[in-house]
């Protein structure tokens, strides 16, 4: 199993109780708003430490509360798309895509060449020199996707990656994304409400559910 | 919603127009008075000779150093106030803002109580161990200016830090940037407008500092007599130079406002 996560984390009134083990596959995460899907991705990304339990990715312990092990986000080699695409506003789309490469030590020129190749292959080459504020929501989302995958991350975390696209663009980007994700090793998590996304993009689905609603505490349990 | 559209039921009453016009006039009239009193032909000579030029030179040097102190100390303090939750944070913030509302003279007296050579808390120690005397020295001017300027920088930078969406830094982390890289390449970059505004307003405040300076550092020509002190004294002996110096300070402040435009003041819209 590539990702083994057993543990819980509390965020405000939400307690996320997780016990999942998944292989090298594309996993859809579904469930109502506020149930903790984004929190789940943040735990995997290393932006939120577990309160108890352990997380292993590809056999490496990334989080173990008892043993006081926590590998922070920048050392985890994840590719993440946030819900509202947070492209760095002071960089062009191209520089945004090249950024993860440069962070891992690729030279500027080579990183930019790889970035422009990836954008052209993805059909966003014409956006390369634009600033994020000049892009529409859908265009930003496309660029954010290219950026998240450029490093060939060992763990892909996509939080509603197609939500800002209209129907036609959605179909087009979905098929591009499926090819990209299939070509990557490791586990890919895709948070989505869209049944077509789940059916066409993903190998399996994990539905988040709340077994009981207490008066002042929400509890979420995920069953594998 | 467009602000140009007139909303029925929320029309501006006449007396508001009258009040607003009076307020504007009240602010503008002294400025017109100042500009009218300046002897424009001799202005260059007036500020480049004698005590006026000495005061300008001293003001420039001390205010730049004071601003640097405010920046080096204020940035970490603003970070702690904006990003770290701890008990008594609002108390600490109130304390930091105190020099903004404190009468500057009181600030000067307080500085004497801390750094005065004979009866200050650590003034005697500073003198015995390092041979440092802050009172009646240019260094004292710097300390007095930094004391009043620091809160302005902290305030601007803190609000700037709060307005940064933390997800920019989080996404930078998922892209492989460590904590110090994120700070230098993402946080500071996003903070730049607030940082520039904070530095500008702190510098303007340091440049105009009067009360704390004269109380703590005195009024020694060429040593601690900054431009505002010189203006006050020259008004008696050489009003032409006093007006000329006033104009220089006014011009600097206008330049600061222009530099801040859009970053701190106009963000509300």
Image (cartoon, rainbow, N blue to C red):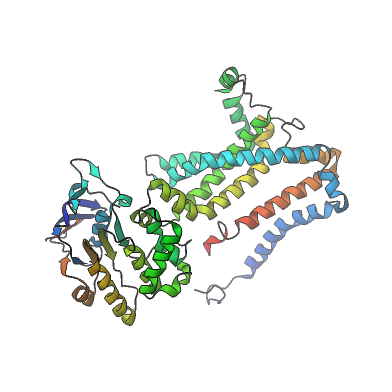
Is A184 placed above or below B43 here?
Answer: below
Point out residue B202 in the picture as x, y percentages from the top left corner: 60, 45
Of the pair A26 and B2, the residue shown nearer to us: A26
Point out residue B266 in the picture as x, y percentages from the top left corner: 57, 61
Left or right: where B251 falls relative to B92: right
**At 73% across and 58% down in the image, what residue appears?**
B28
**At 25% across and 49% down in the image, what residue appears?**
A49
Is A93 placed above or below B178 here?
Answer: below
Of the pair B7 and A181, the residue shown nearer to us: A181
**At 18% across and 41% down in the image, what residue appears?**
A66
**At 41% across and 46% down in the image, what residue appears?**
B180
Quarter holding the N terminus of chain A is bottom left
* Quarter of the image where one finds residue A187: bottom left
Of the pair B122 and A38, the residue shown nearer to us: A38
Q: Residue furthest bottom?
A: A168
Of the pair B156 and A202, the residue shown nearer to us: A202
């Amino acid at each position: 199993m590539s990702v083994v996560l057993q543990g819980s984390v509390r965020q405000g009134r939400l307690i996320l109780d997780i016990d999942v083990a998944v292989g090298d596959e594309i996993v859809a995460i579904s469930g109502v708003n506020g149930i903790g899907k984004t929190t789940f991705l943040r735990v995997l990304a290393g932006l939120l430490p577990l309160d108890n339990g352990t997380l292993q990715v590809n056999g490496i312990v990334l989080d173990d509360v008892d043993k006081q092990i926590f590998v922070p986000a920048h050392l985890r080699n994840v590719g993440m798309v946030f819900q509202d695409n947070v492209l760095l506003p002071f960089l062009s789309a191209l520089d945004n895509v090249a950024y993860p490469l440069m962070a891992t030590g690729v030279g500027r020129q080579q990183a930019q060449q790889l970035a422009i190749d990836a954008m052209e292959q993805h059909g966003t080459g014409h956006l390369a020199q634009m600033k994020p504020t000049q892009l529409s929501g859908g265009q930003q989302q496309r660029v954010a996707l290219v950026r998240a995958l450029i490093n060939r991350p060992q763990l892909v975390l996509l939080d509603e990656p197609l939500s800002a696209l209209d129907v036609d663009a959605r179909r087009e980007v979905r098929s591009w994304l499926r090819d990209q994700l299939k070509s990557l090793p490791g586990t890919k998590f895709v948070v989505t409400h869209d049944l077509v996304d789940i059916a066409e993009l993903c190998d399996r689905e994990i539905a988040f559910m709340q077994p009981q609603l207490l008066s002042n505490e929400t509890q979420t349990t995920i069953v594998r | 919603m467009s602000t140009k559209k007139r909303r029925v039921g929320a029309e501006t009453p006449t007396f508001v127009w009258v009040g607003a016009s009076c307020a504007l006039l009240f602010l503008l009239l002294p400025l017109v008075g100042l500009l009218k009193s300046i002897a424009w032909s001799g202005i260059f000579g007036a500020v480049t000779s004698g005590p006026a030029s000495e005061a300008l030179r001293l003001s420039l040097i001390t205010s730049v150093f004071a601003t640097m102190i405010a920046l080096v100390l204020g940035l970490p303090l603003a970070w702690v106030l904006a990003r770290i939750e701890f008990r008594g944070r609002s108390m600490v913030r109130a304390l930091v803002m105190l020099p903004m509302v404190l009468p500057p003279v009181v600030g000067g007296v307080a500085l004497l109580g801390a750094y005065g050579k004979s009866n200050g808390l650590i003034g005697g120690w500073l003198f015995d161990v390092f041979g440092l005397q802050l009172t009646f020295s240019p260094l004292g001017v710097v300390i007095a200016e930094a004391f009043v300027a620091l809160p302005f920088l902290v305030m601007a930078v803190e609000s700037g830090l709060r307005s940064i969406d933390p997800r920019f830094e989080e996404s930078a982390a998922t892209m492989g940037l460590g904590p110090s890289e994120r700070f230098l390449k993402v946080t500071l970059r996003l903070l730049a407008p607030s940082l520039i505004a904070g530095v500008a307003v702190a510098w303007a405040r340091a440049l105009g500092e009067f009360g704390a300076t004269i109380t703590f550092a005195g009024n020694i020509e060429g040593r601690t007599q900054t431009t505002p002190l010189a203006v006050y004294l020259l008004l008696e002996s050489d009003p032409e130079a006093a007006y000329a110096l006033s104009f220089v300070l006014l011009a600097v402040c206008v330049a600061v406002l222009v530099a801040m435009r859009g970053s701190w003041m106009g963000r509300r819209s």
